[in-house]
Amino acid sequence: MLSTRVLHLLQIIPFLAVPAVYAQSNHCRYGEPCWPSDSIWQHFNASIDGQLVSVIPPAASCHTPRYDQATCATATTNWDNSFWRADQVGAYQTPFWERGLDGTCFIGTPMDQPCDQGRVPVLAAAANNADHVQKSVQFAKEHRLSVVVKNTGHDYLGRSSGTGSFMIWTHKLRGIEFINAFVPTDAPSDYSAQPAVTVQAGVQWVDVYTAAHEKGVVVVGGGARSVGAAGGWALGGGHSPLGPKYGMGVDNILQFTLITPDGKSRVANEYSDKELFWGLRGGGGSAWGVILSVTYKTHPPLKNALGGLFIFTATTPDDAFAFNTAAFAALPKIADQGVNGYLSVRGNIFGLAVFQPDSGVDPENTGDFTLANSTVAPLLEYATSHPNAGTVTLLWKKHASFFDWFNFTISDVSIGENTWFGSRLISRETLTNSPEKLADLFRVERFGAFINFVAGGAVSQVDPDSVALHPAWRTALLSANVDFSQWPDSANSTEIQWRQEQTTVMTQRLGDIIGPGAGSYFNEADPNEPKWKEVFWGSHYDRLLSLKRSIDPDNLFTCNRCVGSDL
């Protein structure tokens, strides 16, 4: 039966200031007359083996009435630890989505300061298996609940939190299985089996990379350690440092298993539920049901990987503008050498973290950095010909494997911070024809960009209509996150809204530079994006909407700027 603790917490939630009145909606939320009774919840809890849990914000243990000294100390110590956050049912990697604009539950504030529930759902099914997920979807459907799906809480658009909602938490669904000769369900007898790996919904990319390295293969995955490997990353498209070599995440998916909104278990691949398979590959998370597992292609291990760091610190803002103009124009040439990575452009500093898989460069063993330097030759040539414009920092390291490069280079950033940004995909054509306009966008010191240099190459060689991903990915070289804005917990709602509005302004300005057909990465985008249908999916949106209406006619699964969210 439902535990006494859960019942107690449900009783004190009204004291914690969960709003009792909601905007009109077809979904039932906590505090409304339609919300299931305690006895109904008890019966449901028994059906999922006692896995119904109350959900509290991660800072709640530091405030009355739920103050606990030891738990508060743990939360304070681990506030910026992405793995700790992923393991907390009520925590999100970006705390804004725990609180919303007017929430009051902060870490490091006095114990007697009010701590409300904010956007954190009130109850969750902490699913241990597929049966728990299936019964949770059926229960949400029967009672028309406002339902969200959460794994690790890596969510920049607030799609896995929701005031007064019921959560299906998939983080406990663990398992990694390598298959030497994978054949999709219902594939024809002449299908050529291929090596693959099936990943359960709760697995994180660092776990997949570790297992793949031990197996002697590589898997196209995210450029972050704690991001889930079989959830929103995959559904949103999945950009990767291995993308230019092997394609986007969705280009490497062979099969999904999931529970769809009708409460049924399904397998989706090229031969079974083919249209759903198309939509899941780029159609975005939290709209199609609950993913149980994803099967990815595996690839032979890299021979090696070259890693580097190039930083140009300009003398003046005008020098920064001139260098950035030259740098943007040079990126297509750099990409043609099999180089990709991550860029940062802010104020007078331009930084490029270089990644070159299967590099012929070995500066550490030979002591000769000539070939390594050639990968960023256009940037070095500009700096050499303009000696007074700024200073260059350049570091190189050769790695024996992708796994070594990943462990040395990649860390999860901006965890436990209030982070907000917008994004646009930037094509080779834009870099070639409008580099000065791109550089001019970042003249304002307060604004800048974190840029994923992860497209081109194999990404561009895939039929744009083969998956639901925005077609603009197939001509892009960059996915630029603009105005990577952060604010302290002490910021008031006026300042926060101003920052959010400026993000939208900057993002739209970037879109204007790119012109018609501009796209945006669904997983890293402006939560207030005004052109979301156009920039998330482009010409694929109408087909996705038709699929949504077919698979989820009651719109059970809805979220911020997801397919059909405005129905």
Image (cartoon, helix red, strand yellow):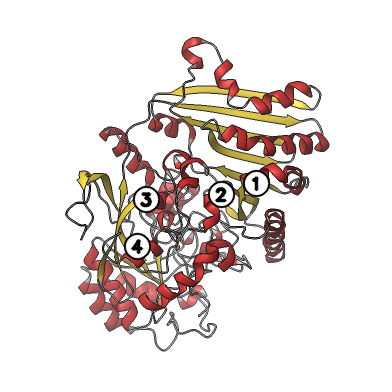
Q: Position of 393 compared to 317: left or right?
A: left
Q: Cα distance, mark 3 to mark 1?
A: 32 Å
Q: Report the mark closest to the observer, 2 or 4.
A: 2
Q: Report the mark closest to the observer, 3 or 1.
A: 1
**Marks 2,4: beta carbons within 8 A:** no
**Marks 2,1: beta carbons within 8 A:** yes
- Determine whether 213 is above or below 44 in the image: above
Q: Cα distance, mark 3 to mark 2?
A: 25 Å
Q: Quadrant of residue 88?
A: bottom left
Query: Local crowd at mark 4 within 10 Å, few (<14), some, or many (≥20)?
Result: many
What residue appears at the point 48 percent right and 17 percent down from the top-left corner? 362
What residue appears at the point 53 percent right and 43 percent down from the top-left corner? 456
Q: Cα distance, mark 2 to mark 1?
A: 8 Å
Quadrant of the drawing holding the N terminus: bottom left
Query: Local crowd at mark 1 within 10 Å, few (<14), some, or many (≥20)?
Result: some
Q: Which residue is mark 3?
A: 229
Q: Earlier in the sequence, mark 3 or mark 1?
A: 3
Q: Which residue is mark 2?
A: 475
Q: Which residue is mark 4?
A: 277
**Marks 3,1: beta carbons within 8 A:** no
Q: Which of 553 and 497 lies nearest the eye of the viewer?
A: 553
- The three-letter code of the residue at mark 1 reads Glu
Q: Quadrant of residue 418?
A: bottom right
